[in-house]
Image: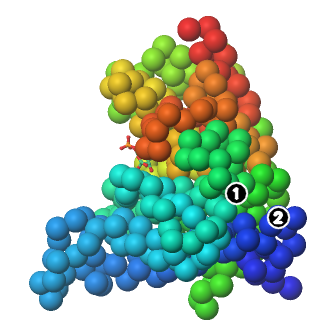
Amino acid sequence: MTTTLADWLDTQAVDPNLASVVASMAAASAEIAQVLREAPIAGQTGLAGQTNVQGEAQKALDVISNDIVLNHLRRNAEVAILVSEELDEPVHLENQGLYLVATDPLDGSSNLDVNVTVGTIFSVLDAGKGLLQQGKAQLAAGYAAYGPATSLVLTFGQGVAVFTLDAQGTFVLTLDKVEVAPSSGEYAINTARERFWDAATKAYVAENVAGETGDAGKRYNMRWVGSMVADIHRILQRGGIFLYPLDSETVSKGGRLRLLYEANPMAMIVTAAGGAATTGREDILDLVPTAIHQRVPVILGSVEEVARVEAWYRRG
Ligand code: FDP
């Protein structure tokens, strides 16, 4: 018997209004999936300022995705505020809802032109508690991965479920209670940045490269899609670690990835699945944001791998 997203949401011990916010993000994701599927035919390359075959100006796909999310959330009276990677300022919606949604409507967009998996990431918070809340205050988090299949990954903090979009546009439960394997032989990092890395990152990666001949004592493989949703989706299902650490080039900005709508929701999901998420020195979910578009270092995945990285940071 199939369990749809609606069936699953009915069984969750959460406020039905909160469940409806998650359902709105799921509906937005299904619409974005449809747009992405046909984007090359429509001449939508993902880049701003392009024209389609009719010579019409095209909006960038990340702007279109943002508009889709905004439209879905406007129709849901439970959402009061939207924070989006695409919008400099938060949007105060005209309804009196209790919830705030923070989202990266289309993450990994540099991969769009080559038909590699991209995604929508989101976090749901209590709007009454302000814009700058710790990740541990999140009420729900999720992402959609637009790959060979469209997957939707959700958590309310206890357990992580994965849904797959069927041909009728319904999300069907395909994996329940996902657990991140505690150890793994795979790591994901942009090694082209090695010259900018700090000592801890260099030491951890050097151990992995040495494999069974070094202190790690086992062989490692490197996997880097360069699209955070795709890399995290792999780690969620077969373990591993994702690192976008602070490095000498990103230090002035605080890191590469955004706290409110990339690091926090992914940290909530990975932690709910039994993994761990850190900056190297602090649990991501404990960080107190100082700005809505703040960037932070992100290291997350299998607990034993994250612990090895943290141990290097304690030494350095
Ligand atoms: P993108 O710029 O394509 O949106 O969110 C930023 C992000 O992608 C992540 O999805 C991805 O992990 C990272 O940037 C890739 O960074 P590199 O350019 O260093 O590979």
Disc ID at residue 113: none
Colour mode of the rendering? rainbow
Residue 120, position as x, y percentages in the image:
51, 62
Using the rendered view, name the quadrant where residue 25 is placed: bottom right
The residue that appears at 36% across and 21% down in the rendered structure is 248
Note whether residue 30 is visible. no
Q: Position of residue 170 (x, y in %)?
A: 65, 85
The residue sitting at the top extreme is 315
Q: Point out the image quarter for the C terminus.
A: top right
Which residue sits furthest left?
A: 55
Which label is found at residue 140?
1
Q: Residue at x 43, y 32 (%)?
A: 255
156 lies left or right of 281: right
Taking the spot 58% from the left edge, 28% from the top edge, the residue there is: 279
**Dot 1 lies on which element?**
strand
Distance between mark 2 and mark 1 Cα atoms? 10 Å
Amino acid, disc 2? Val
Earlier sequence position, callout 2 versus callout 1: 2
Q: Position of residue 33 (x, y in %)?
A: 49, 76
> Please, what secondary structure does the residue beneath circle 2 have?
loop
**Could you tell me the amino acid type at mark 1?**
Ala
User: Which quadrant, please, contains the N terminus?
Assistant: bottom right
Q: Nearer the viewer, residue 24 or 32?
A: 24
Q: Which residue is mark 2?
A: 14
- Between 159 and 241, the residue placed more toward the observer is 159
Q: Are circles 2 and 1 on residues that touch, CB within 8 Å?
A: yes
Q: Assess disc 1: are there few (<14), some (14-19) or many (≥20) residues with their C-alpha within 10 Å of its C-alpha.
A: many
- Placement of 261 over or under 172, stated as above or below: above
